[in-house]
Amino acid sequence: MKFSYHACDASGALKIGTTDAPDAVEALEILRRQGLFVSQIEADKKAEPEQHESVNRGRMGRGRLLKNMAMFTRQLYVLNSSGTPLTDAIRSLGRQAKDPKWRAVVFDLFERVEQGDPLSAAMHEHAECFDPVTRSLIAAGESSGNVSLMLDRVATLTRKQLQTRSAIISALIYPALLITVSFGVMLLLLLFVLPRFAGLFQSLNVPLPATTRFLMALSGGLQSYWWVLLASIIVLAVGFKVWSRSDAGIEVLHRVVLKLPIAGKLIRSFAVARILRVLGVLSQGSVPLLDALALARQTMTNRQYSRLVEKAEAAVTRGSTISSAFADSPLIDPSLCEAVRSGEQSGQLGSLLLNLAEFLDEENEVVVRSLTSILEPIILVGLGLVVGFVAMSMFLPMFDLTAMTQHS
């Protein structure tokens, strides 16, 4: 940290300035060795106000963390590759950070690196922000003396994760909004519109069609027992949440999502692309293959794919190849296994894995956009049919009454 001081030199001239030191005692010793006689010294709060922020260990949201990480690693790569010392670059990025939690993390990195810790070790103290893949790549860059190259690879990997996440979320926002509006319209009709028609139908004393009687019964049930429905939804939601976090629930969910008719194939493709990209980046970063597989396994959120990578680890330990472990699994397309085998034989495994991951990501984006364009009109048509069914059920008794009046 910085300390401002007032001192005199050997000739008695007044010297005012700042110096960097871990604490005030060390700062006094540094100035004494420079031949200065210190009369006043204090922490320079104007120079580094952000360094005194406490590091908030609370978790950041996944999207928020990825945005901060992508920006931080890209800017740190640019500054470091242009010749800016690592400590100065980190401090500069900390001053620019707008997110308070992230700014505190960056300044903690700065303080640790300034005190002599490697960047990878400083990142290890914030494992909730910097995953094992990032720390391993930075450590490999430190050992090879090429940190800037590894920062570029981490930035590329993080940016790709952010793009994938953003593409999925943006594709789901509109369908989710339509579904929410659909349920809102149905509740509005059942709770507020249909009861008004119920009084009208009773006063008319006309026979009601089956669909109208069904809607009236449903509306009456919701009005009388809405609290039962609400309590049931809460109990089911809490029960599902507890079950989904148990080992049995996780196993079932991870198997089921991979077997869904259309979404399952897309989820498998995203998971494979993630494995290939992480392995490709780590391989090009000179990380040993077994370590790369262990790190890739840690990034998997689905246990089925985590076990698949673990199986590949065991195969490599026995002296076999990754492609041989992947070939026996239905979770990876056979054509991808053949491509991985070709990369292993040619010695260009890292670049080939990255090319495959890029191809899968592009294909997945096209599929997501296509599904969204198909899903939106389906939801709109479904909403129109439901509203039309309700409207016809309400107006049919009136049509019948009109017909009876004309005949009489």
Image: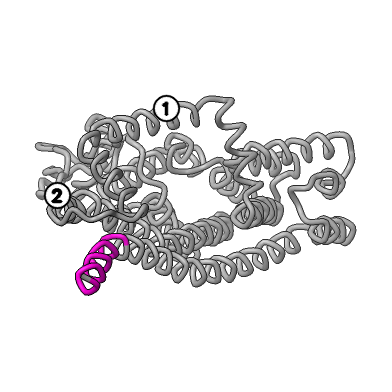
Tags 1 and 2 touching, CB below 8 Å: no
Q: Residue at x 41, y 62 (%)?
A: 175
Q: Which residues are magenta?
A: 393-407
The residue most toward the front is 408
Q: Helix or strand or loop: what does disc 2 sit on? A: loop
Residue 325 vs residue 155: left or right? right
Q: What x and y, as percent, mark residue 83? A: 46, 64
Residue 25 vs residue 7: left or right? right
Residue 279 vs residue 19: left or right? right
Q: Residue at x 76, y 63 (%)?
A: 352
Magenta stretch: dominant SS?
helix
| 45 or 256: nearer the viewer | 256
Label 1, label 2: how far apart the Cα atoms are: 53 Å
User: For the residues carrying marks 1 and 2, which lies nearer the camera in this image?
Assistant: 1
Q: What x and y, as percent, mark residue 266? A: 62, 57
Q: Which residue is mark 1?
A: 239
The amino acid type, in three-letter code, at marker 2 is Lys
Q: Residue at x 24, y 36 (%)?
A: 226
| 209 or 56: nearer the viewer | 209
Residue 73 visible in this rendered orientation of the protein: yes
Q: Helix or strand or loop: what does disc 1 sit on? A: helix
| 337 or 39: nearer the viewer | 337
Magenta segment includes 402: yes
In which quadrant will I find the N terminus?
top left
Judge the density around disc 2: few (<14), some (14-19), many (≥20) Cα neighbours within 10 Å. Answer: few
The amino acid type, in three-letter code, at marker 1 is Gly
Label at residue 46: 2
| 334 or 238: nearer the viewer | 238
